[in-house]
Image (cartoon, helix red, strand yellow):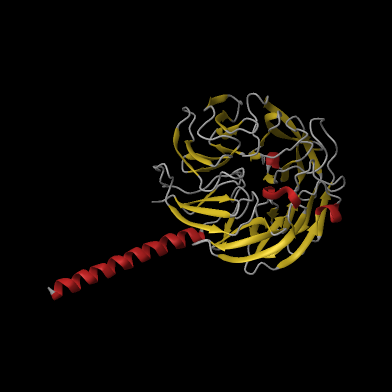
């Protein structure tokens, strides 16, 4: 009996050791996962994860941990070097926060600006951009701040209005997630002489500023609520951005204005980040604007944007949840203040299918992983839909905890086999591998 008891104890210790090793393996894998900026490594909302669990119950995937202390706001998260970064408002302060990726415990919190006044839950919307040991953010008031990722110390700071004459197209404050490209930090003050600027990422010194001329009459002057993406269309490296007047392209090396397209602009808020692919740019906004695919062509003097197709808002308009390109199709939500699941053929603009209202209501933020696109609805419903042109196929949905009080708008993130959902002061981390 003594031998048997010892054997049972030994076996138990072995099993505990195996479990601990497995937990460490999961932790190590997730800690090395990178989602270093807005919409992921390539700013396309595409996760590289495979082999995920798609068979959820009504409560969703297993919850690994919940962390609090993120404050109010709709900033999504970035992940690098085992840390998670975001922004929030609390006690009349706007701050950047870093937590440990394994369990969500706070590492540091740094104030960068005053809070968004009496507007309460609106808070910041910028997702921090991580480059090595530095984090770059834009406050609602247009403060461009570089911080050390280890301790949260402010390394340098600029302001869109004071330094560049910047302004927004409308009154909800700056919402951009800045872009790091090589030695440059590229961002959008929206000023008459400095629509887009490139700064030295190490010092904040100005490299160039781009003057954006007036074009189109559907929008308004100033920055909008989108973020810059990089295009190599027709052999010209350029930065593509959705601004108050519409979508623009500027030369990456010099900031020279190349082209503009105003047909998708509205006068309230141009929000979704454009999608670039080869020589093409997809863009869409809500408020009755619509959607378009552009082809960029080289000309003797620069680059021109040719409209391939345009869809009126009643057919396709993305309010502020974004869309993803998978294969030859676009997936996401359509409708102003709505997220009706939709599949659109990239080359033609043909609406392959429209899933109707779907399981949730309000606008829906998107991320893609492992054959599925996920929609996070404004009312706190999270849905998993198969990314296929063969019809609308809802796999499952669940309600995000504590999502009833305010609009549920922060974009979801999938990285390292985990799903991250920011809900105002809370961040929920789910296991997608079990």
* Residue 79 vertical placement versus 220 (above, below): below
Of 305 and 56, nearer the camera is 56
**Residue pushed farthest left?**
1
User: Is residue 35 something that shows in the picture?
Assistant: no
Q: Give the x, y percent position of residue 216.
A: 81, 31
Residue 98 occupies quadrant:
bottom right
Q: Is residue 205 left or right of residue 41?
A: right
Q: Give the x, y percent position of residue 389.
A: 49, 29
User: Is residue 305 something that shows in the picture?
Assistant: yes
Q: Give the x, y percent position of residue 161.
A: 84, 52
Q: Is residue 66 left or right of residue 223?
A: left
Dividing the image into 4 quarters, which one contains the N terminus?
bottom left
The count of marks equals: 0
Q: Give the x, y percent position of residue 82.
A: 54, 63
Residue sitting at x 74%, y 38%: 269
Residue 380 occupies quadrant:
top right
Of 39 and 318, nearer the camera is 318
* Residue 59 vertical placement versus 36 (above, below): above
Q: Is residue 120 left or right of residue 404?
A: right
**Residue pushed farthest bottom?**
2
* Residue 221 vertical placement versus 106 (above, below): above
């Amino acid at each position: 009996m003594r031998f048997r008891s010892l054997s049972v104890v030994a076996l138990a210790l072995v099993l505990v050791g195996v479990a601990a090793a497995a937990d460490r393996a999961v932790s190590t894998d997730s800690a090395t996962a990178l989602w270093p900026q807005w919409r992921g490594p390539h700013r396309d909302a595409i996760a590289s994860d495979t082999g995920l669990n798609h068979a959820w119950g009504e409560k969703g995937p297993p919850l690994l941990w919940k962390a609090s202390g993120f404050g109010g706001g709709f900033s999504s998260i970035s992940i690098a070097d085992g840390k998670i970064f975001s922004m929030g408002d609390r006690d009349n302060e706007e701050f950047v926060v870093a937590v440990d990726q394994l369990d969500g415990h706070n590492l540091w919190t740094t104030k960068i600006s005053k809070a968004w006044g009496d507007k309460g839950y609106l808070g910041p919307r910028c997702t921090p951009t991580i480059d090595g040991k530095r984090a770059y953010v834009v406050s609602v008031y247009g403060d461009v701040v570089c911080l050390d990722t280890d301790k949260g110390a402010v390394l340098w700071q600029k302001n869109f209005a004071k330094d560049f004459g910047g302004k927004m197209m409308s009154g909800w404050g700056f919402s951009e997630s800045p872009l790091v490209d090589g030695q440059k930090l590229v961002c959008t003050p929206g000023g008459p002489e400095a629509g887009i600027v490139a700064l030295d990422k190490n010092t904040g010194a100005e490299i160039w500023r781009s003057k954006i001329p007036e074009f189109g009459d559907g929008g308004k002057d100033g920055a909008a609520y989108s973020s810059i993406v990089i295009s190599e269309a027709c052999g010209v490296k350029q930065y593509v951005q959705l601004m108050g007047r519409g979508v623009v392209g500027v030369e990456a090396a010099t900031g020279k204005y190349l082209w503009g397209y105003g047909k998708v602009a509205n006068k309230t808020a141009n929000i979704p980040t454009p999608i670039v692919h080869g020589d093409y740019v997809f863009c869409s906004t809500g408020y009755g604007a619509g959607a378009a695919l552009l082809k960029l062509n080289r000309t003797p003097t620069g680059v021109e944007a040719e409209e391939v197709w345009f869809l009126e808002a009643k057919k396709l308009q993305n309010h502020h949840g974004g869309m993803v390109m998978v294969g030859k199709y676009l997936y996401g939500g359509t409708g102003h203040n709505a997220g009706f699941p939709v599949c659109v053929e990239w080359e033609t603009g043909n609406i392959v299918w429209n899933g109707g209202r779907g399981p949730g209501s309000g606008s829906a933020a998107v991320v893609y992983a492992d054959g599925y696109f996920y929609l996070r609805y404004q009312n706190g419903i999270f849905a998993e839909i198969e990314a296929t042109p063969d019809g609308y196929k809802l796999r499952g949905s669940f309600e995000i905890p504590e999502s009833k009080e305010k609009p549920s708008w922060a974009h979801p993130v999938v990285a390292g086999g985990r799903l991250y959902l920011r809900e105002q002061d809370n961040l929920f981390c789910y296991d997608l591998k079990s």
